[in-house]
Image (cartoon, grey):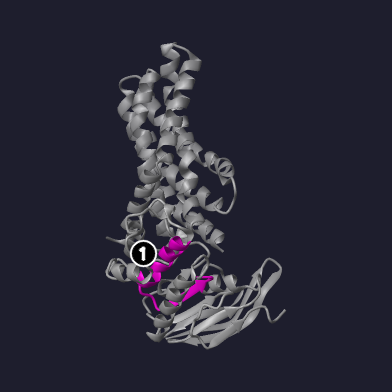
Amino acid sequence: MKLVVENLTCRRGLRTIFEDLSFSLEAGKGLLLKGANGSGKTTLLRMLAGFIEAADGEVRLEGGDEELELAEQCHYVGHHNGIKHSFTVRENLEFLGGYLNEENAMQHYQEALDTFNLKGLEDIPAGIMSAGQKRRLGLARLVLVKRPIWFLDEPSVSLDVQSVEILAGVVTKHIADGGLAIAATHVPLGLDVEDELVMGMGR
Amino acid sequence: MSPFITLVKRDLQLSWREGGAIGTALGFYLIVVSILSIGIGPDLKILSKIAPGVLWGTLLLSALLSVDRIFHNDHEDGTLEVMAMGPLPLELVTVAKALAHWISTAIPLVLIAPVLGMFLNLPAEGFWVLVVSMLAGTPAVSFLGAVGAGLTLGLDRGGQLLSLLILPLYIPVLIFGISTMDAVLVGPGAFSTSFSILCAITLVTVVLTPFAAAAAVRMNLQ
């Protein structure tokens, strides 16, 4: 499996965010997006995930599941956690599992709880949890629903040192298992990835 | 369970859990109709004459109160992004959410309407046609509302703009909803003529608006 980005250009109004961006990423590799605030890391990730239409160029997946769209083979973790505050941890994960992966919705439920230290919080409404706990719940869908490609935009926000280590471990394992991950982050996540892409160099 | 049903179930659960939407809509409906009937006074003839218009018009306004919730909350906490990565195309996500809005808000409003009809001295033969015509017309209210909710997603205080955008589109539903009732209450004209047109409006809306709403949501997810 290989994610290929060719001559990708993003324009917002008259402003060009990036131009002629090309790279490819094979299964089992990670890519770290670096760059100053406003250099287009989030824009690139949202474009890869299919939220923003490219002005030019294309994103394609070679050797993926032909039956599924690219978006259905990706996880996008953005600035928002994507959880419902009036739902408990269990209900949040039940929905995410049931919606994103109806056949074995709860197969990885225990694993997701264990990985992100959410044991004992299952029946607590997400709204009264701390920011870090909410973030961990938001990240739990990475483990709950298996998808080969991860786009992570500042995934470590509001996580404590220990949780950042957990996250780094999860991402490392995902890559080792033959997945792909692209992460934008300012802090050293401890990600074991060789490639780095520095945004905003063209300007 | 299919992802579509999972989504409808989730939205119903949320609207029940968060409560405010149904309560506000029902309370608003009750209060506005009471205020109008008190303001107009105890002339039973006038009251029963204006009953269909008051009940229908206020129903549309009450339903509108909660329409912006169809997408707004999910956009704010990022769950809409998760849905966009799911197995359903956004068009079907829109259908599921509008359907959940109809079940959770419009149906309770329709069920309370006959009670309010008594305030307004609605003639006895008007009650069944009130409920039937409202059940047929309100899906259009939720589905048109979803378009407005999608368009005003990224805006602060989008609710006010939403009313301006969507209320004019409710007028055909209002006209044929009332003419369905008039056909039974005062005549002339047959119930089936107006009612068929009302159903047609709903069906066309249900089929076409998901595309518009999904396009609006896509634009706001950029």
> Left or right: A50 with respect to A197?
left
How many marks on residues?
1
The residue under label 1 is A118
> In percent of the image, x 33 and y 70: which residue is there?
A114
Q: Is residue B192 visible?
A: no
Residue A43, image quadrant: bottom right
Judging depth in this view, the residue of A121 and A6 nearest the camera is A121
**Image: B164 above or below A106:** above
Outermost residue, top side: B43
Write down the region rendered in magenta: A132-155
Residue B142 placement (x, y as % from top left) = 43, 44
Q: Residues within 10 Å of mark 1 (few under 14, many from 20)?
A: some
Q: Chain of mark 1?
A: A
Q: Is residue A139 magenta?
A: yes
Placement of the N terminus of chain B among the 4 image quadrants: bottom left
> In percent of the image, x 38 and y 49: which residue is there?
B14
> Secondary structure under badge 1?
loop
Q: Is residue A59 visible?
A: yes
Placement of the C terminus of chain B among the 4 image quadrants: bottom right
